[in-house]
Amino acid sequence: MARKTFAAAALVGVALVALPAAGQGLRYAEDLAPAIVNPLFTTTMSEARVNELLFSGLYTDDQDLATSPALVAYASLADDQLSMELSLKPDLRWHDGQPVTADDVVFTIEAMRDDDTLSTEAGRVSWIDEATAVDSGTVRLTFTTPQATPEDKLYFKILPRHAFDSTTVSRSDAFRTNPVGSGPYRLARFNDDNSISFTPHSTFDGGVGISELVMREVSDKNYQAKLLLYESLEALVRVLPRDLAVLQNNRKVELYPYQTNSWWYVGFNLERAPFDDVRVRSALSMLIDVDALLAPVGTGEVLSGPFVKSSPFYNHDVPYDGYDPGEASRLLQEAGFDNSSGAWMRDGEALTFTLNAHQTLESSQEVVINLQSQLQNHGVEVSVDFLDEAAWKSRVWRERDFDAILSQWSFDRNEDVREQLHSDGLRNFGGYESERVDELLDTARDASDPFAKKAALRELHAVVAQDQPMIFLWTLDSYAALSTRVSDVVIHPFYFFTFVNQWRMN
Amino acid sequence: MRRELVLAVLAALGAFVAALAGVALLLQILLASAPGDAADLISDDPVLRAALVEAWRLDEPVLSRWLAWTVDAMGGDLGESLTYRPGQAVTELVLPALARSLVLVGGALVLSLTGGLGLAWWTAGRRSATRRLVQALSVTPVFLLAWLLMAGLNEAAFGLMEGGQIARPAWFALPDEDSWLKTLLAISVLAVGSSALGEIHAALEDELLRIQRASFVEALRVRGVALGPHLLRALLAPLATIAGGRASFFVGGLVVVETVLHVGGLGSLLWQACRLRDYPLALGIGVVAGALVCGARLASDVARITVDPRLSRAP
């Protein structure tokens, strides 16, 4: 009692000003505030989430994650699947009150394609040959190749032509601090503490339920859950596994599970020995007890290929070759290794490698330490090197200077693994090459029949599982956490705020 | 005396400019040797990357980048941010951050010097547990001290709020809300942690003992004059020396304290700039921080010479 009285007295000294209970706004946390608010230059998920609040695309996802019109009222695809006409909804307005027109759509596509814009999103419209405004509310798109479901690719955000001087847009354009969109929220202000305040777009189709949103920068991920418990935040985009139990037991917080198209893997540099030998890669995968690796970092599903289990492309017929040290020994011996000394050796050289991991990959430290320990117990020495974002991009992505990496891929609902697995893929930094996989990826890309695409990608799963350019680990169960004051919450697994206009504050 | 003072100030100004140029070059070398660059963070597309590298002159030799930057900086142009806030002038980012950091460094100097002086006065020539207590508290690293204090205050306030004993304080919860308490906490952590207070206390205690043994103090004592004002006056020069030295220490501590307590000052901005390989921003901060340190030393020298003109004639 005395201690409590003392603590109260001490705090009264600093609690001179009391605030009323939190207002009707919703505050959510990001590790790092967006550097730039312009969909032409999106590079981080925090920027993508802000874009989701401020901008609309021609199409979006519905709550079943099926394609649904956003700015578009109706569309007609030509019989040859080489062109499409899109009619915009009438009375659409930008945040500044100007009407949304077909010219804006044409401008956006041209700005993304403009070589001098240096847009990071240029690839999203590379399949569009030409965009023309038929009239103020109608756009005609022509395609470079037949497209069975072009609406699936028309998710990119539309920009207001009147806010720019030309289709050549600079990263430093004033738009980055004064963005004008047609999404459910408009940017009200950038605050001194790096937070950003958003207010509702008054003419947004269907209205908006929460009167203010604030993005707060909380660089310490470990502290975000605390701030939610303290009611200094109302939403966490992703809860760290170690915070789940505490939040689950708090009556002021509700957890929202969601399925992401993300999977973890250990990738090998196939241009370096001994990872150029599939037997070595397979053996290493059999020396790893994936379930034991997963247990400390959360719950999820162990995978045998490059899709999550709920994906239509996941091939459930491909067996998961689990932990099997006996078979691993056989494969290593077949590959010329000997472990009579306790460590696997070939030609006088030990089987050792460096595992690189990204510093910001959640729970990667636990995984790496466990993985190191498991392999060491089986005679494989692993050293570990954590890299920050810039070092990761340069060493792993650009220079390909690595033995093996622990990482994660996240996809939107198209689950396009072409860049990761095609021999020409920009993100195939392991150097995987398979003629059959290239063919299957081409088939999947060009297929107008969804069943043909599914069949191709399921076969790809089987081929890749056998070639094992990487050890597929798991997809983690993800949870968002929101204050119970927020209701009608539906979360988009990738963009998070797609359905935010329906959320309400009680 | 005036001429000697002017010469000393001119010499210090020359050293100041040379030090800033050196800081800029050193930072250029360090940033260039770090793996990855700003373009790596933007795109994995080789064509786009090549265009960014050219636009941002990342392919130029360090020395040529340094020269170009120095010429622009001498005209007052510190360039534009590349990745932290693309296109924003570095001065627009650095100046508000400098104002916040000055409050912390200035506050920490005042607090540590007055605290150290008070403690020295209390413990000089005595066997005191206070000395050991101060040393033990002060040896705590600033990041740990900041985190412990922040977590402790948050937990205590939350417990009392949940129990209905206090209303929600305006500062709650740290470090999310900007408040005078957060500023005070940052100043206190800088002033005390990583041995700052302990070392200042020990140095001032030594000075005080030395002065107390001086012959003029003995003479004053014999004449029955109050010693306090004379001792304080004699301590001004050592205080100025300590302040000049400590300023650089506190500027260095800003990176940790501002990052932990989420203060948007030079330290946290430098951390982000380095993480994002934002060279112009990192250089701008480095040079401004260098100027702060050099300025503090200059002010310290001027103060010492003003207080004790004999120092300007010292070999």
Image (spheres, helix red, strand yellow):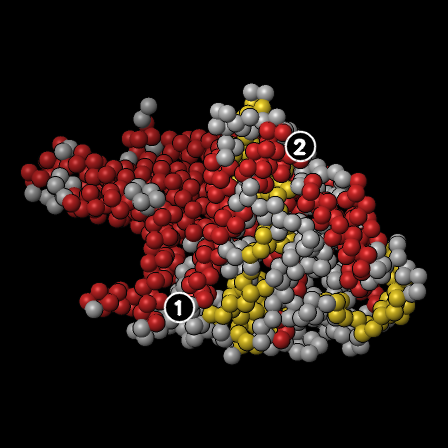
Residue at 56% in and 60% down:
A478
Instruction: Work out how far the residue at label 2 is from the one at label 1, CA to CA, in angstroms.
Output: 62 Å
For label 2, count other residues whose C-alpha is less than 10 Å away and answer few (under 14), some (14-19) or many (20+).
some
User: To which residue does mark 1 refer?
Assistant: B170
Which corner quadrant holds the N terminus of chain A?
bottom left
Residue at 56% in and 59% down:
A477
* Amino acid identity at mark 2: Asp
Give the label on residue A277, or none: 2
Mark 1 falls on what kind of element?
Answer: loop
Above or below, A346 against B150 in this view is above
Determine the image quadrant of residue A33: bottom right
Chain letter of disc 1 in the image: B
Residue at 64% in and 71% down:
A499
Q: Which residue lies furthest to the right in this view?
A: A80
For label 1, count other residues whose C-alpha is less than 10 Å away and answer few (under 14), some (14-19) or many (20+).
some
Chain letter of disc 2 in the image: A
* Amino acid identity at mark 1: Ala
| Horizontal and vertical percent position of residue B96 | 51, 53
Q: Nearer the viewer, residue B68 or A262?
A: A262
| Horizontal and vertical percent position of residue A83 | 90, 62
Question: Seen in the image, is A13 located left or right of residue A41?
Answer: left
Above or below, A370 against B171 in this view is above
Q: Nearer the viewer, residue A234 or A166?
A: A234
Question: Seen in the image, is A167 located left or right of residue A278?
Answer: right
Q: Nearer the viewer, residue A330 or B180?
A: A330
